[in-house]
Image (cartoon, helix red, strand yellow):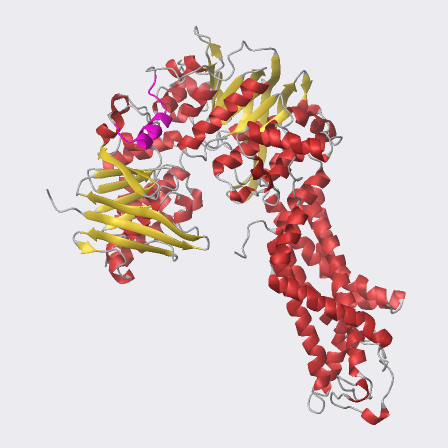
Amino acid sequence: MTAPGRSLWQDAMARFRRHRAAMASVWIMGAITALAIVVPEFWPNSLDEVNWDYLESPPTADNYLWFGTDVNGRDMFSRTFYGARISLTIGVLTTLVALVIGVAYGAIAGYRGGTPGDLMMRVVDVLYSLPALFFVIILVTVFGNSFLLIFLCIGAVEWLTLARIVRGQTLSIKEKEYVESAMAAGLLTPTILLKYIIPNVIGPVIVYVTLLIPINIIVESYLSFLGLGVQEPYTSWGRLISQGADEIGTAPWLLIIPAAFLVITLFCFNFIGDGLRDALDPKDRTR
Amino acid sequence: MSTPLLACEDLHVRFETHAGEVHAVKGVDFEVHPGDCIGIVGESGSGKTQTAMALMGLLADNAAASGSVRFREEEILNAPAGQLNRIRGRRVSMIFQDPMASLTPFMRIGAQLCEVLHQHSDMNRDEAKARALEVLEIVQIPEPRRRFGMYPHELSGGQRQRVMIAQALLCEPDLLIADEPTTALDLTIQAQILDFLRSLKKRTTIVIITHDLGVVAGLCDTVLVMQEGRVVERGATETIFNASEHPYTRALLAALPRPKRVQPPEGPSIGTTAPGKSLLRVDDLRVHFPTRVQDRLRSRTVPLKAVDGVSFSVAEGETVGIVGESGCGKSTLARAILQLIGSTGGRIVWQGEDLSGLSRKAMNERRRDLGVVFQDPLSSLNPRMTIGNIIAEPLRRFHPELDREDRDAAVLNALRDVGLDREHRDRYPHEFSGGQCQRVSIARAMILKPRLLICDEPVSSLDASTRKQTIGLLKDLQKKHGVSIIFISHDLSVVRIVCDRVLVMYLGHFVEIADRDILFDSPAHPYTQALISAIPVSDLKAQRQQERIILTGEPPSPTAPPSGCVFRTRCPVATDICSEREPEFRTLENGARVACHHA
């Protein structure tokens, strides 16, 4: 017998591995993630410890203060990677939440169509019309400030756009003859959604999602700025950047270092997104 | 001999692609003299269109042309755009295949025509408008004044093609190049346009590019046959048709339908066994779609009667053909039988039970016995799945008990049945040609050994030779598995080869139901007669002598079908009674059933 047939995902993995920029990005993000996990736990200077001898010190090899210290003399290395922990978790997890809800909701609304589909989209419209910030403030007032709440807030707002994108794509794809063939072959609705609709809407979705991760990181920073996100002494990239911006004349490294990490992350997710989009599309564009 | 209008010498076109250089046109020579009508014939990929594009300087950016093209002794190959623009549109015009894609959707017809005149002449507005109207008259568009203010989407396909021709004729060009001018059109509309092009030969020199020798037969004086970038045969049309030398030309000719009553198609039709018991019975089926129309100030909902009361049955092992032009409701009928579209009325009785009354779940179970093959080979396969997975999909659904190895074995079997290799299993649809994709569709439809296979225009997007193979494949599979087939097509010549019985459909109604040979030898309904006479045939003499019935006008809208007989607005024999009473089916002596007051 010959080898068994390959599946879409096996093929996609093989194609993704051939995308060099995407693979490099995966390694870089892997490294940042590993540091984000390890550094805050084991680094000699903790994130809230004040180094009285090194107030607002530029990066130096002394005392492991490789990224310098902030105005309060706290170690930026430790703070940057603690910030990575918060920012990446929020960026990735909220986007995943938004992705799962948005794609499922949009695909079902588009595929079902008719009045139920329209009703589902009107619900989206109503949620869309609520100002996100107002929404968040209400939630925080009712449930108190917590990390989990930030997920819910950002995720609850961001999936709406995804649902609209996916629904629009689904409406056009369900008219394709291969979907009709699948219906005529008696395939069940979940199979059609998972194997026929969703893989074919994923292109524009991935592009949007890779933009969404950095957007969510920024959203978290302004929530924090308003006192709704993480609170001192804990921190995130968004907070570090906004604090660094205040000191740009006297201590530029406070801005440059966290901003550089955010930019690197942004690029990496864009490349990973490109790689995923190409990997999920059998029409090979890389050659 | 006079100096040629256009002389093309040793023309080569090469494309630089990521997969290396593609040599699309390999040294083509020909001359066009004033008053000629030349046909360039070849299948897709033969380089015929690229030749025309090179003549007009319209090649894609990654293409390079070499050789020589002279228009009235002036070298125009690779000429600068300024020089070409003096010639293009004014002295040489081109008509493209897809009339919708070649007209700007946001501009009114009249404005588009006048724009060309403003570009190429110094006419003022009124002169330009007068000239545009004059040309619209020439191309025989009904009510040219009204059409002048319409947008392209408001016209039918045939009218758009006429507008395209009008646009090409505006500046009275010396040479008209038409690339597949009738391919996108229905048979009776194609007959109208060809008839018109014949009358145009007196005005201008024409080069027609087509895959269909039948189109060339009644029109051109000289024919060039192209294969793989080379001209393999050239000569007077008579010589090519009656004494062609090149095997490729003969293959193309053999793929054409034979003239009527010369010789029945070789071999028996698919189902030669006596029809078994009834498998499917359709009773007075109606499918109406609510559509909104703007009626002065209010909009109201009117039913679009896509299928309006049709009845027929399919017996075991039988092949039934449904023939009609686009928009007649034949695809809607197929989808209604498969319950992909809900019906408005009537019954679909499948093995004794009414499908339209079943729940979704129960209907889904019945689908294992109903296979379907759609028209567009590529878009009916999920681009994200391998061929093997596509074919295995029905097995996963209906035989979840099979393990991977059994399923793989079944898929390999199915691939072999349709003439594909086992290596093809792990490839994706876009790596295949149209014919191969259609084989995959057939393999998928047949893997559960259904009892009825519904083919909706399965071969209309394929080249002549691929078409022949695909039909052969369907025949073989039917012989092997004894499946019944409903074969839907606008192409009577294909239906003639495949079907036992033919149903002719017009505007949501059947107009004639007859056995194949009876229908083709003595068509009773005037519409059937017109359709049959519009088939381009391979025998030149027959083609030229045959009296053609050219229907005027176009099918009316299914939202407002005519009273009485739906065909009366285009019928050459219509009388008063046709508008008063809807004709009922009568059985003729030869067994044909026809719905016409005059048959």
Observer able to see residue B458: yes
The quarter of the displayed image where residue B275 is located = top right
Q: Outermost residue, top direction? A: B589
Q: Which residue lies at the image location 71% right of the left edge and 67% below the top edge?
A: A29
In terms of depth relative to the viewer, which is nearer, B504 or B303? B504
A73 versus A25 height, above or below: below
Q: Nearer the viewer, residue B464 or A138?
A: B464
- Asked if B314 appears above or below A131 in the picture, the reply is above
Establish if B384 lies above or below B448: below
Most distant residue in the front direction? A1
Based on the picture, tell me whether residue B98 belongs to the magenta stretch: no
Residue B72: x, y in percent? 17, 51
- Horizontal and vertical percent position of residue B342: 64, 30
Residue at the spot x=38%, y=24% of the render?
A: B531
Which quadrant is the N terminus of chain B positioned in? top left
Q: Where residue B515 sits in the image (x, y, percent)? A: 46, 13
Q: Is residue B247 magenta?
A: yes
State which region is magenta: B244-260
Q: Is residue B292 left or right of residue A61?
A: left
Identified at 69% across, 18% down, the residue is B353
Number of labels in the image equals: 0
Image coords of residue A281 (percent x, y) = 59, 51
- Asked if one can make out residue B376 in the rendered structure from this viewpoint, the answer is no
